Amino acid sequence: MRLYGKDWTRRELEARVGRMSQLGGVRRMTLTEGKEAGVELIRVSTGAGLALDIVPSKGLDLSRAELWGAPLSWQSAAGDAHPAYYESSGTGWLRTASGGLLMTCGLTHAGSPSDTPGGPQGLHGRAHHTPAAQVAVREAWAGDELEWSVEGLIEENALFGANLRLRRRIFGRMGVNAIGIEDRVENLGFAPSPHMMLYHFNFGFPLLDERTRIAFPPAVTCERSGTGDAADCERWERPDPFARERVFYHELSERDGMAEAVLHQPVFPAGPGTADVKVRLRWSADTLPRLVQWRMPGAGAHALGLEPANCQVEGYEAEAGGGGPVMLAPGAVVVHRLELKIEAGQAMIEEA
């Protein structure tokens, strides 16, 4: 394992600590106050600077993520609100959407509230507010590498309706500032089912400021409104209380392998100084052929959403009008793969 700028064997590290959790690892805990009471978190620390909270109570989504103690993700005012407070109709989703590094939108619906064959669906579907089952946490040595994983099931089903099951696995290694996500979605029903999926990654200050630049994979880009300059996609700005959200669609030109978007912050906080940091988000272009970009540089709601998806965000009715949505046949399985990797250049110590 590479840690603190040096390669170590397992026994060399074990000789220096009482238990490996001194250096990092996976730990389960439960929140106790207000609307967050009862929400379970699984905190992962890589030991190399990256730490994040996985939330079994909310579909194994990812809440706060930080590097060297400074946040990478944007958190909404709702915090990690318990899914018991979820309002499923209309835009009630917004009242308990946590923000955080990832909110999963799906499994049968994503985007604006819509009337669907299975009945009315609220904003972005139910996945983000569905507690996971069969949650398993694992740490295990593979030679001199300590691997970790968190796995569980998220289901969306209704009598006489859809019956989809998502098996999510989140994984990584100690000493490495990267995570992988593998989502296996299966139609357990006996009729075709819509499968609209959007991975709502949310980035915020201090990763985002006026010096941040964003790079995209080869794509055809347009704003949802049909207006606007695509060059706006690649920059960020200071908070503006009068700002309004904007949505851009990046239709991938290449739909094989893994697509990648990169956020570059040359002065990310690193102790008493700063470091040149790049956050690389990669995803399976064959199953998620579109990147939705949500730009909200407002005051308070100051966030950038990079959202690999298999749909747009106008909702089911718009997808149906355009020849969609993606349908899963009875018994069919689709696997979505995503990766988040952080690269950091040499820290620069600032003079007092």
Image (cartoon, helix red, strand yellow):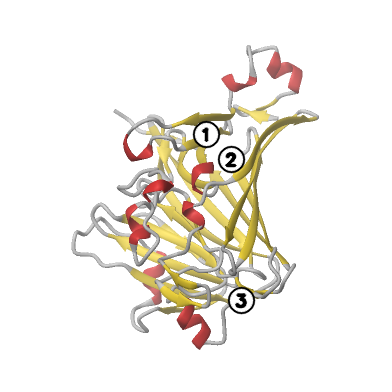
Q: Is residue 345 visible?
A: no
Q: Nearer the viewer, residue 159 or 244?
A: 159
Compared with 185, 22 (above or below) is above
> In the rendering, at what x and y percent does residue 97 appear?
39, 53
Q: Are marks 1 and 2 in contact (CB under 8 Å)?
A: yes
- Looking at the image, how many numbered discs can be counted on the residues? 3
Q: Earlier in the sequence, mark 3 or mark 1?
A: 1
> Which residue type carries mark 2?
Asn
Q: How many angstroms separate mark 3 from mark 1 (CA)?
A: 38 Å
Circle 2 residue: 177
Q: How many angstroms separate mark 1 from mark 2 (CA)?
A: 7 Å
Q: Nearer the viewer, residue 283 or 280?
A: 283
Q: Nearer the viewer, residue 328 or 66?
A: 328
Give the image quarter of residue 157: bottom right
Q: Nearer the viewer, mark 3 or mark 2?
A: 3
As helix, strand or loop, the secondary structure at mark 1 comes to loop
> Which residue type carries mark 3?
Val
Compared with 174, 165 (above or below) is below
> In the rendering, at what x and y percent does residue 302 appear?
31, 55
Q: Is residue 42 left or right of residue 188?
A: left
Q: Is residue 287 left or right of residue 60?
A: right
> Which residue type carries mark 1?
Gly
Residue 326 badge: 3
Q: Residues within 10 Å of mark 3 (few under 14, many from 20)?
A: some
Circle 1 residue: 49
Which residue reaches farthest left? 242
Compared with 71, 125 (above or below) is below
Give the image quarter of residue 349: top left
Quadrant housing the C terminus: top left
